[in-house]
Structure formats: structure tokens, C-alpha cells
Amino acid sequence: MTAFSLDPEQTARCARLREQAAERLLPLVEKADEGAGAGAPGRVNRPLVAALGELGLLEDLFTSGALDLCLMRESLARVCTEAETALALQGLGGHPVHAYGTPAQRERWLPAVGAGRAVAAFALSEPGAGSDAAALALSATPDGPSAWRLTGEKSWISNAPEADFYTVFARTAPDAGARGVTAFLVPADRAGLTGAPLAMLSPHPIGTLSFDGVRVGADDVLGEVDRGFRVAMTTLNRFRPSVGAFAVGMAQAALDATLAHTAARDAFGGKLKDLQAVSHQVAEMATRTQAARLLVYAAAAAYDRGEPDIAGRAAMAKLFATESAQFVVDTAVQLHGARGLLHGHLLEHLYREVRAPRIYEGASEVQRTVIAKELYGARPQEPQREKGTPTA
């Protein structure tokens, strides 16, 4: 198997995931959409998270490779973006515990996350520190030996304020940039921790967290003190290609809908697909979707092989896939006309969903910066010519 093809077992697994999403997961979302309870849009859908656990998909987050993670996210996104997002958020919040947690932390939380009984969240962004993650201001001031008090705010946190625990990044060394950040596992019921939802263009919950002297100790540290930035970056590097897979899944869903619509829609004495202006647009949609898919698969395969240039590859995959998905969904809406924007239409849903991935886990501008740094960092230095040496 290469990075550019899937073996029959992988292809069959993707098909099974799409079937499971249609039969088990999408009905839970549709049921929640009808009410205003805990699973309504903007709230954590705990029955959906539990179903992901029952299907074994949440446990796969911590045992599968990056490519398998991408296949999971792409397959779910083609059918049920809410299920895909619920799965991804469990992975994002739980991966630091899996990779850096103590045996006690892992034993306490990972079985519950994998079974869908506990909801996880990744709390990195702040009101004044989004793309510049090294500028974190949430302070962790010493409170006796091997203990701290967390004071400050987090914002734009997915699953907040309804998660059961948060992977929180706080500043333990002032004026130290990325070197002075520590990762903590903070249960939601810790004294002094409160939160509030934000009204966002998103079907999943996003909120703020306020830390009023929240006490954490050595048992709450994930990884090493003052080395939390590494926890954050390794987690993001693992998940960035799969954000691209999420985008590819949405693009494919939009493309599928467009193929069906343009083949059936009567227009100007024929079918919509017979118009060259339409067929060329559909061809462009398909080309960009496939190119994004291959870039995502290649980045994930490189991660699984442990190659050194994963940061640049992951950035390319996320950048190209999310930007391409935006184009594909927008074009699909254009070719569907007004019906594509009717509330409840697949494309109206995708149109709302597709915008955010270009911002979270590193905005497109940040990805371009990462790519450029990798390119110039890998560029061999040209030898300096001695003065007076003639040029060719």
C-alpha cells in the first residue's frame, strides 16, 4: 500500500463506516435537531458520543495510525458531520492524556472517553492568544510545593462548557514564550472553574472557560512542567492532516449532491450537466477534491512512518484541503441555486460547517507560515563566494 491508494480492506472499512453513520449516528442527530435538549445544536450530543463508543470508533482514536484516523473522519463527514466532529473532539481532548498522561490519569479517563461516557476538550485558545499559541496568558502561579493556581480565561473551546475534563495549557514561567507553558488535566468539577457557551456558526458546542484560582497539582500535569507546548504541538500535528480529511469528506458530499442534481435538473432544453459552464465547474470540483484527498493521505502516511517533515506536510494537507472544500461547497451551492440554501438542505448545512476548519487548529495563514519556515529551514545554504571570484 502506498500513500496514494487504499487496499481492499481499507476501502471496505470506509464503506462500513458510511453505513454505520447513516444507520446509527445520523438518526441521533436528526432526533436531537427536533428538540432543545442536551443534544440540540450547540450542545454536546451525549447519545451520539455514546454511540460512537459502542461502535468502537472512539477507542480506535488511540490505537489507529494517522491514515486510519483520516479515513474515519472522511467517511463519517460524508454522511454525518456532527458524528465526525464529536469523534474528532474526543480525540483532540483525549490524545494528550493517551500520549503524555500518567498511568493514573490514563486509567481514570481513557476508558471513559473510549466508551463515550466522558466528554473531553482541548483548551488552548484564549481571547488574546489564538493563532499565536505561544502568547498564552492563563497563569499558573505556584501554590506550595508542586502545586499551582490557574487564573485567567480560555475562549473558543469546543465542547466547553459541557466537557467532563479539559486539557488546559497554562503559563508556568512568565516571559518564557513557548518554553514556559505546562499542560494540565483539569476535571470540569474542579473548584473555581466555570464556563459559558458562545453563540457560534457551529452545530457543536463552543464556549469560554474562566479559571478563578483553580488549584492543580503534580498529579494533574501532562508531560513535563514548562514543556506543555510540545504536548500541544504534537497533538495538533497528529490531527491537522485529519482536519483535512474532514474537509475532504464534506467536499465529497457536496460533489456527490452536485452530480446527482446536475444530471437530473432540466435546463435550456437539456440537463444542467450538458452545459459546458456547469460540467467544467463540476470537473474542477472533482479535481480539487481528489488532489486534497491525496495530499491528506500522503501527510498521514508520512506521520505513520515517522518522517521528519511532518509539520510541513500536515500544514499543506490542512491548508489545501480546507481551502478546496470551501471552494467545492460554495460552487455546489451556486450550481444548486436557491434550493441549496434552504434551511435543512445538505448544502446549507455544509455551507455553515465548511468555514470553521480554515480557522481552527491553525488558520490558513498560520499553515502558510509553517510551510514557508519548513521550506527555508530545509534549504541548503549556498556557499559564500570569495571576493573577486568571477560569476558565470
Image: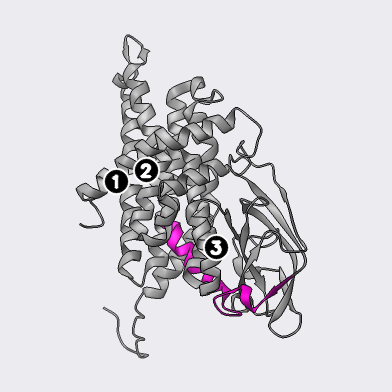
Q: Which residue is mark 2?
A: 75
> Which badge, 2 or 3, is on the more N-terminal residue?
2
The part of the chain drawn in magenta is 215-241
Q: Quadrant of residue 263?
A: top left
Secondary-structure class at tag 3? helix
Q: Which residue is mark 3?
A: 109
Q: What percent of the width, then of the height, locates residue 211?
A: 75, 63
Q: Which residue is mark 1?
A: 13
Q: Nearer the viewer, residue 287 or 46?
A: 46
Q: In the image, which is nearer the foreground, mark 3 or mark 1?
A: 3
Reply above or below: 15 against 139. above
Reply above or below: 225 against 302. below
* 216 relative to 21 in the view: left or right: right
Q: Are marks 1 and 2 in contact (CB under 8 Å)?
A: yes
The kind of residue tagged 3 is Trp
Name the residue rendered at 37%, 52% in the picture.
70
> Which badge, 1 or 2, is on the more N-terminal residue?
1
Reply above or below: 20 against 339. below
